[in-house]
Image (cartoon, helix red, strand yellow):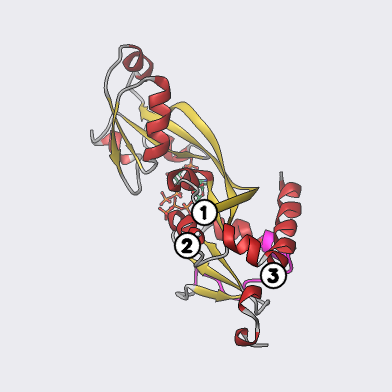
Amino acid sequence: MSTSTIPAKRQLILALSKGRIFEDTMPLLEAAGITVLENPETSRKLILDTNDPGVRVIIVRASDVPTYVQYGAADFGVAGKDVLLEHGGEGLYQPIDLKIASCRMSVAVNAGFDYETAVRQGARLRVATKFVQTAREHFAAKGVHVDLIKLYGSMELAPLVGLSDAIVDVVSTGSTLRANNLVEVETIMEISSRLVVNQAALKLKRERLQPILEAFERASSKQS
Ligand SMILES: Nc1ncnc2c1ncn2[C@@H]1O[C@H](COP(=O)(O)OP(=O)(O)OP(=O)(O)O)[C@@H](O)[C@H]1O
Ligand SMILES: O=P(O)(O)OC[C@H]1O[C@H](OP(=O)(O)OP(=O)(O)O)[C@H](O)[C@@H]1O
């Protein structure tokens, strides 16, 4: 059956990012009976077919997943809590914590930097991060004055070359911090990835979406 014979309200588009989110979402899709027929690591295609002619996967940057879903260009997607907090969640229904791509959001500094004393003495800190909303809220709640420097990657470099006193970044094994002689001084929050659904799609395509959401929920609760 070609996609053109499937009514629009039965066609679904899922937004995923390459790498850990794509890989960790595959078993959940399999649990819903959906197999992606192409591998984004080896193919340059951005729209991937599945064994279900009514379901396609689009490959976008991790931080762009909420935007595609918010505007309805994708019906649903998978995004980290870190990314969702920066986006704000407008237009998104977030029904399931998939408990994949688990990590934590932390503050880290150069091994020699006395963060506690700097905070206690009311120093103004320069903080480099991709997660400016989360960092702003964290330091405001602590009453710490910060100048935030927006970066798009490799945050760990910033304190090493004097761009910042501290970073706010995600940490999993801690090996990137250790390799760069940085220490974690505060955990801001635990992070995992969530299923996000376009609010209009949830109403208009509920019949098609519901069984997939239920399969994701069952499969993710088995993983935890
Ligand atoms: N080291 C890690 N271990 C486990 N989960 C992680 C790790 N790093 C990031 N994550 C989680 O996985 C999600 C996707 O990470 P990924 O590295 O694929 O994208 P990114 O490079 O951070 O995003 P972008 O390409 O938009 O800059 C993150 O939003 C975060 O929730
Ligand atoms: O504590 P660890 O296990 O070392 O993980 C932390 C690292 O993981 C992420 O980077 P990633 O591997 O996703 O590379 P990226 O920054 O290029 O996305 C994050 O930005 C840290 O650098």
Name the kind of residue labelled 1 in the image: Gly
Q: Quadrant of the N terminus?
A: bottom right
Q: Count of labels shown?
A: 3
Do the numbered discs 2 and 1 sit on residues whose CB atoms are within 8 Å?
yes
Q: Position of residue 173 (x, y in %)?
A: 53, 39
Name the kind of residue labelled 3 in the image: Ile
Q: Position of residue 171 (x, y in %)?
A: 48, 38
- Residue 11 is left or right of residue 163, and the answer is right
From the image, tell me which residue sits under label 3.
34
Q: Disc 3 beta carbon < 8 A from ligand 1? A: no
Q: Is residue 57 visible?
A: yes
From the image, tell me which residue sits under label 2.
71
* Residue depicted at x 31% and y 11%: 121
Q: Position of residue 12 (x, y in %)?
A: 61, 70
Q: Disc 2 beta carbon < 8 A from ligand 1? A: no
How much space separates mark 3 and mark 1, taking CA atoms?
26 Å
Secondary structure at badge 1 equals loop
Against 117, is 137 above or below? below
Q: Position of residue 20 (x, y in %)?
A: 54, 55
On residue 175, the disc is: none
* Residue depicted at x 51% and y 60%: 69
Q: Disc 1 beta carbon < 8 A from ligand 1? A: no
Q: Is residue 91 magenta?
A: no
From the image, tell me which residue sits under label 1.
91
Report crowding for label 1: few under 14, some 14 to 19, many 20 or more residues within 10 A (C-alpha): some
Q: Is residue 76 visible?
A: no
Name the kind of residue labelled 2 in the image: Tyr
The overriding secondary structure of the stretch rendered in magenta is: loop
Q: Which residues are magenta?
A: 27-42
Report crowding for label 2: few under 14, some 14 to 19, many 20 or more residues within 10 A (C-alpha): some
Secondary structure at badge 2 equals loop
The mark closer to the camera, 3 or 1, is 1
